[in-house]
Amino acid sequence: MYKFERLEVWRLALEYDDVMFRIAAALPLEERFDLAAQIRSASRSIAANIAEGSTTQTAKEQARFLGLAIPSFIETVACLRLVERRRYPLSDEDRAEAEQRGAKLFAKLQAFRRAVLKTGTTR
């Protein structure tokens, strides 16, 4: 097992990614290479940056990768707002799950980054 696989925030990112991929898959065909691809890429980037940061040697470097995961998360939120604004199909369940999991993930990302910077140790 790799270090990042033991991180709760990484597991939360995977769960959030599952929801975002479901939402992207439900978009109209004309959005397959635009909005859907952007959602998938940004969502995937969250977990990837958490994993990559866990292999670093310094807390500052790990915090930098966590800092990259946060804007990727925000990008998915912006994309979700575009989905809603354009009134693309989005089930109430997917919307609620994205909001719930997203809020928890965002809070954990921020808290983890602060903790890494404060303690000066990688986790």
Image: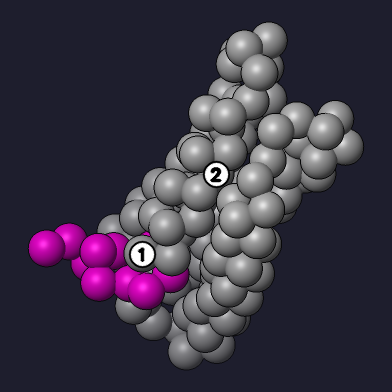
What whole-number distance in Å separates the C-alpha atoms at marks 2 and 1?
A: 14 Å
Give the image location of residue 118, x and y in percent: 55, 88
Task: Indicate the amino acid at tag 2.
Answer: Met
Residue 71 appears in the figure: no
Disc 1: which residue: 11
Q: Is residue 88 left or right of residue 10?
A: right
In which quadrant is the N terminus drawn?
bottom left
Q: Residues within 10 Å of mark 1 (few under 14, many from 20)?
A: some
Q: Is residue 15 visible?
A: yes
Q: Find the magenta span and give its range.
A: 1-10
Circle 2 packing at 10 Å, graded few (<14), some (14-19), many (20+), is: many
| In the displayed structure image, the side of residue 1 where residue 123 appears, left or right | right
User: Which circle, 2 or 1, is nearer the viewer?
Assistant: 2
Q: In the rendering, at what x and y percent does residue 90 appear?
A: 68, 40
The stretch drawn in magenta includes residue 6 = yes
In the rendered image, the residue lying farthest to the top is 30
As helix, strand or loop, the secondary structure at mark 2 comes to helix
* Quadrant position of the C terminus in the picture: bottom left
Q: Identify which residue, 113 or 24, lies in the foreground.
A: 24
Which residue occupies the extreme bottom position in the image? 119
- The amino acid type found where label 1 is placed reads Arg
In the image, 80 versus 106, the foreground residue is 80
The answer to whether the residues at label 2 and label 1 have Cβ atoms under 8 Å apart is no
Residue at (58, 29) in percent of width and height = 26
Q: Which residue matches tag 2?
A: 20
Residue in the picture at 39% in, 82% down: 121
Vertical relation: 14 (above or below) 45: below
| Residue drawn 65% across the image and 61% down it | 96
Whether residue 3 is in magenta: the answer is yes
